[in-house]
Amino acid sequence: MIPEFGFFALILALMLAVIQSSAVFIGLKTNKSSYVNLTFSAALGQFVFMLIAFIILVVAFVTDDFSVAYVAQHSNSQLPIPYKVSAVWGGHEGSMLLWTFILSVWGIAVTLLNRSLPRLSAARVVAVMGMISIGFIAFLIFTSNPFDRILPNFPLDGQDLNPLLQDIGLIIHPPMLYMGYVGFSVAFSIAIAALLEGRLDSTWIRWARPWTLMAWVFLTLGIMLGSWWAYYELGWGGWWFWDPVENASFMPWLTGTALVHSLAVTEKRGVFKSWTLLLAILTFSLCLLGTFLVRSGVLTSVHAFASDPTRGVFILGFLALVVGSSLLLFAVKAHRMVTTGNFQLVSRESFLLLNNILLAVATVVVLLGTLFPLIADVLQLGKISVGAPYFNMLFVPLFIILLIFLAPSPVVRWKKFEINQIIRSSIPVFVASFVVAAVINWIFSNEMSLSIVMVSTLVFWVVLNLFKDILVKVKFKLSLNSLLKLSSSYRGMVLAHIGVAMTVFGIAYTSTYSIERDVKMNPGESLTVAQYQFEFARTEPLKGVNYRGTQGVFNVTKNNQLVTTLRPEKRIYNVRNQPMTEAAIDAALSRDLYVALGEPLKNGAWAVRVYVKPFIRFIWLGGVFMALGGFMVMMDRRYRLLKKQHAGSQVADGGVVTS
Amino acid sequence: MKKSNTMMAVPLVIFIVFLWFLWKGLSNDPRILESVLINKPLPQFSIESLKDKNIIIQSEAMPKTSYLLNVWATWCPSCRAEHQYLGKLKQQGISIIGINYKDEREAAIAWLQQLGDPYQLVVYDEAGQLGIDLGVYGAPETYLVDALGKIRYRHAGPMDETVWQSQFLPRINRLGKLGGKQ
Amino acid sequence: MNHLICRRHCWILCCLLMLPVSVLANIDAYQFDSIAEEDKFKKMIKELRCPKCQNQNLSDSNAPLAKDLRQKVYNMVKQGKAEQEITQYMIDRYGNFITYRPPMTIGTMILWFGPFFLLISALIMMTMRIKNKTADLNQPLTEEEKHRLQSIMKQHDKEAQ
C-alpha cells in the first residue's frame, strides 16, 4: 500500500501548491491579511508532503519493492545500499521527483528566511514559487508517476541501475545540479514579484543577492562534478563534450554568472534594473528549457532519457506559460524600473556591463549551437551536427576578450575612471605576467607556444592584478589579520576570479599538451609517454559485490623511480551483463596519469589507453574556487538573511527608492 | 533616461519565435537521417554473391526496372520482423535486391532457407564497404531505385504495410509515369 | 498512428540496447608512422560523428558502424589523404550530419556570424547609450531644474543646522 501513499502525498502537495500560489492574491483583492499567512503555511505543507513522497520512494528502493515499476527498472537486490538511494534519481520519474522536492526545499527556505523583506513582498515571492511547483507536481502526477505499480505479476528482481551511474560522482552530481537549477527559481520569483509590485529598490536587490549566489554556487559545483565524473567514468578522458545535456546546464550558468554581476551593480549603483530582471527571468527559463531538451527527445544526446513526446508537449506548454507570461509582464512593466545612477564609458559599471554582454553572447553561442540542428531540421536545411569545433572556435575569442577586461577591473572605480590610469597601473603587471607565463611555458615544455603564452599571460595578469589590489587595500601590510579585515564579499570576489583564471589555465595547458596513446600491449611490455614509463605488469581477476572482471596492473616510473601503480579495471556487471571501463588515474596538481583497459586482443595482448594530462586538475579546482568565492560573497555581513531590516536603511546605501 | 516600451517587448517576441521552433521540433525525430544519395545514381560496386563466392556481381547487373534494395543481416531483430512482408512484396511481383550487411555467410544462407528468400539477388557485403558507400547507418534499410538506376527514396527501419502504402507506392506510381515519358 | 507508436518503441528499444555497448570506452590499437599522422587521425575521428543512435563522435563510440568508419578514416590517413578529402568522402555518403563542424552555407550564416554580429551591435548600443547619457548630464540645467536644485539645497542647509 505504501507507494500509493506517495502518490497521494503528491496530490496533496499539488493542492497545497495551488493554495500557496493563489492565497496572497486573493488576500490582496479582498484585503484580508490572514491570506498572506496562508501562503506561508501552504508552502510549509507542500514541503512536508513532498518530503513524504520522496522518503516513500527512497524506502521503496531500499526495501527492494519491485512491484513499483520505477524501482524494478532502476534497482536490484544486489545493489549496494548507497546506490539504491542514488538510484532514486537514476531515471526520469525519480529525478523529476527530486527536482520538485528540491523546489519545495527552496520554497520553505524562502518562507523561513524572509524577515528582511516586507511581509507582502515575501508572500508574493513564495506564491510565484508555488506556481512553478504546480507545474512540476502536475507533470509528475500526469506524465511521470514514480509510484506506478506492476501488478499483479511484478518481477522478482530489478533490472539494476545502469553501472555508469553506480558511482560516487553520480550520487552527488544530480542533487547539486538540481539545487542550482531550482535555486534560480528564487531569483526568478523575486523578479516576478518585483515586476508585479512595480519597483525594484535596494532592499529587494540586497535580499535577492544571497539567494542567487547560493543557486550559482550549487550550479557551479554541479557542473564541475558532472565534468569530473565524465572524465574518470566514461573512459574517454574528456572533461567536456558540448553535448546538449551539458549545454543545458552551461547556459543558465553563463546567464547566472551575468546575473550575479549585474545584481552587484544594481545593488551598489541602482543601474541596469530592467536588465537584471530580464537576466533573472532568462536564467530560470534556461533551466526550464534544459529540462525540456533533456526529456523531450528533440535533440539526440549521449545522456538520453528514454524520451516521450507527451512529456515533451507538457513541458513545452509549461515553458510557454511560465516564460511567456513572465516576458509579457516584463514587456508591460519593466519600463517603470527607473535607473538612478549615471556613469561614464570608462567606469566599473561599463566594465560589468561588458562582462554581461560577453556572457550573454556566450549564452547565445551555446543556445544557437545546441538548437541549430533542430532549427535546420524545421527549416528543412537538412540534418546538421554542431559540435566541439564550432563551440571552441567561438568560445576562445569571447573568453579572451572577457579575460582582457577582467584583468584590470579591480582598479577601475565606479562612475568615472581614466583610461590612462588603467593603462598606467596595468602595464607593469602585464609585463610581469608575460614573463611568468613565458618562463612557465619554457620550463614545462622547452618551447614557447605563442597561443599558450598569450592565454597564460592573461591568466597571470588577472591573478597578479588581484594580488596587487589586495596589497593596496591592506596598505602593503600583508598579514592574516589585515586580510581578515577585508570584507567577505571582496575576498569572495578575489577567490572566484582566481578560480576563473585557474580553470582557463588548466583548459589551455590540457588541451595543448595532453598526450594520448591507444596501443596494443602485452603484459611485460612498456610504453613511454612524456617522461613516464608505463609497464604493463600483469592482469588479475577481479570480483566485486555485483560485478566481475579483470584488473590490469601498471607500474609507472619516471627516471627509474616508481611513481605509482595504476590498476585499471574492466568490469562486467552481473545483472545486465554490461561491460564497463574503469580507468585508473594518478592525480596530481601538475599532471594526471590515466590508464584504461580496452578489449582483450589476441595472444594475451590488450588494447590500452594511456594519457598524460598536464594541469587538468586546475579545471575543477578552479570550479571549487569559484564556488567557494561565491559562498564567501554570500556570507557577507550585508546579506545576513536573518537580520531584521532597519527602517529607512534602504535609503542609506545610495540605492534611492524609486517607484 | 526614458526607455521605450517596445524595447522591453523584444525578449517576448524572440521567445515566441523560439517556441515555434521547439514546437515544430517536437514532431521531428532527430535520429532519422535523409539519404544524401536521393536522385543520385546507385554507387558503383563489384561484390561477391551471397550464395556463391565465386560469382562477382557488378552494379551493372542490377534490374533495368525500378526495384527495392534491402539491407539486412541475421543479427538484426527488425530484419526478421520485416522479412515476411518482403516475401509478400515479392509475390506482388516487386523485384528486391538484398544486401547482406556485415554478416556471416552460412548464417545468412541458412536464414534464407528457413524463412524463405524474397530476393532476386543477394550481394554479400561482409566488410560493410557498400554500406558505407550507400550511407547505411543501421539495418534494416530499404532503398527505392528507379529504372535509370537512380536512388529515389530511403526508408530506415523495418518495412511494413503502412510504410509501403504511404511512402513507396506513391513514389513508384509517379516513377512509372515518369519512366513512360522518358 | 499505431505504427508511429510502434516506431517510437523500436527506437527506444534500439537505444536501450545500444546503451550498454556505447558505455564501453572504445580503444583501438592502430599503428602509425609518425606523430603527425596519429594526430591527424585522432583529430578526424573526434570531428566526425557516429551516424548511429546517439550523440557521439567516431572516437568515443563503440558501435560497429563507428568502428568501420574509423577503419576507413585510418586507411585514408594512411593513404595520405588530406583532412578535407576525408571529410568530403564522409559527407558524400552520410551528409553534413556526419561532421561536427557545420559547413559554411547561406543557411548556416546565422550560426557562424550571428554571435559576432550580436556582440558588435551590443557594443555599439552600449557605447551610444552611455555617451548619450553623459551628454545629457553635461548639458546646462534648465531654469526649472536650477530652481529645484536651489530649493533642495536650501532644505538641506536647514536640516544641517
Image (tube, coloured by chain):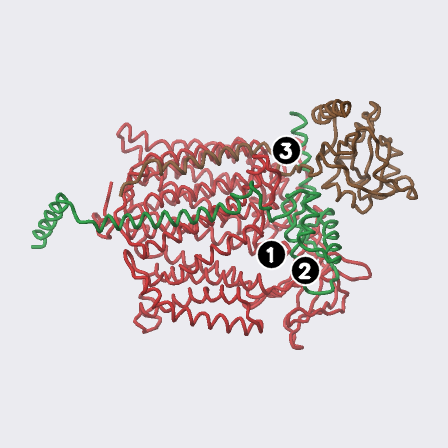
Q: Are marks 1 and 2 on the same chain?
A: yes
Along the line of sight, the residue nearer the viewer: B37 or A643: B37
Q: Quick one: A645 or B19, which is closer to the camera?
A: B19
Residue type at tag 3? Ile
Please identify the quadrant where the C terminus of chain A is shown: top left
Shade of chain A as shown in the rendered figure: red
Q: Provide the letter of the chain coloured green.
A: C
Residue annotated with mark 3: A150
- Front position in the image: A417 or B118: A417
- Residue under label 2: A596
Which chain is indicated by disc 2? A
Q: CA distance from mark 1 to mark 2?
A: 13 Å
The chain letter for the residue carrying disc 1 is: A
Q: Amino acid at mark 1?
A: Gly
Q: Is residue B54 left or right of residue A656?
A: right
Q: Is residue A537 above or below residue A14?
A: below
Q: Colour of chain B?
A: brown
